[in-house]
Image (cartoon, helix red, strand yellow):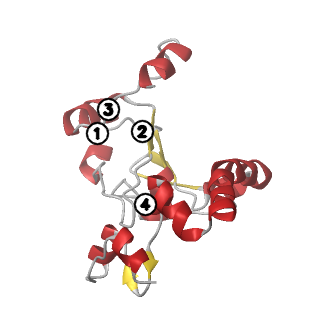
Amino acid sequence: MLDGLAKRFAGRVKTVYSTKAELEASVYDADMVIGAVLVKGARAPHLVTRDMLRRMRPGSVIVDVAVDQGGCFETTKPTTHTNPTFAVGGIVHYCVANMPGAVPRTSTQALSNATLPFTLSLADRGTDAALKADPHLLNGLNVCAGGVTDRAVAETFDLEHVDPLVALTRR
C-alpha cells in the first residue's frame, strides 16, 4: 500500500514504516508529517517528541489525526475547525478534533458504508450469532453481561478482562 502511494505521487511524497530510526530521519527532512496512530481503547503514544520537532525546519507542518486519542506528537493540543492551527517553535500544528466534522456529508457516507455490513449482519442473524460469526464485530464488543470484553479498556481502567465469547455465554 505504501509503495502504491509513493508511485501515485511520483516521488513527491515519502511513506515509511514507523520504526524509531525511520521516524527520526524522516521528521527532520519533512515539509509535512501526518501522524495517524490508533491504539484501540488507549491513548495514542507520543511518537514524535518535542526535541524531534525542534530539529524540523521552521514553517514545516504537522497534522495530528490522532488528536482525538490524545495525539501522537508531544506538542499536540486539540484545536477547532474555527481556529485550526497553532505554532510551536516555528512548526505549524493542525490538530483539529473530529476532523471528519469538516465534511459531514462525506464522512457520514463513509461511516455508513463501513458500518452497513455489520448492521445487516446484526439484523439478519441477531446479536449473539453475528458476534460469533464475525471476528471483526466481536472485536468491537467492549462490555457484555457485566464484564469488560475489551482488553485495552480493562487495562486502562484496571478492571478484569473477560473473554468476549465467555461473556456471551453468561447472557
Q: Between tags 4 and 2, which lies in front?
A: 4
Residue 18 on image: x %, y %: 30, 37
Amino acid at dot 3: Tyr
Q: Residues within 10 Å of mark 4 (few under 14, many from 20)?
A: few
Q: Mark 4 vs mark 1: which is more N-terminal? A: 1
Q: Is residue 17 left or right of residue 103?
A: left
Q: Label 3 belongs to which residue?
A: 17
Q: Mark 3 vs mark 2: which is more N-terminal? A: 3
Amino acid at dot 2: Pro
Tally of marks: 4
Amino acid at dot 4: Asn
Query: From mark 3 to mark 2, how far is it between C-alphas?
Result: 25 Å
Q: Residues within 10 Å of mark 3 (few under 14, many from 20)?
A: few
Q: Quadrant of residue 53?
A: top left
Q: Label 2 belongs to which residue?
A: 58
Which residue is depicted at the point 49% across and 19% down?
4
For label 4, the SS is helix
Q: Are marks 1 and 3 in contact (CB under 8 Å)?
A: no
Looking at the picture, tell me which residue is in the foreground, 53 or 46.
46
Q: Label 1 belongs to which residue?
A: 55
Q: Is residue 53 above or below residue 128?
A: above
Q: Label 4 belongs to which residue?
A: 139
In the picture, which quadrant includes the N terminus? top left
Q: Mark 3 vs mark 4: which is more N-terminal? A: 3
Which residue is depicted at the point 40% across and 50% down?
37
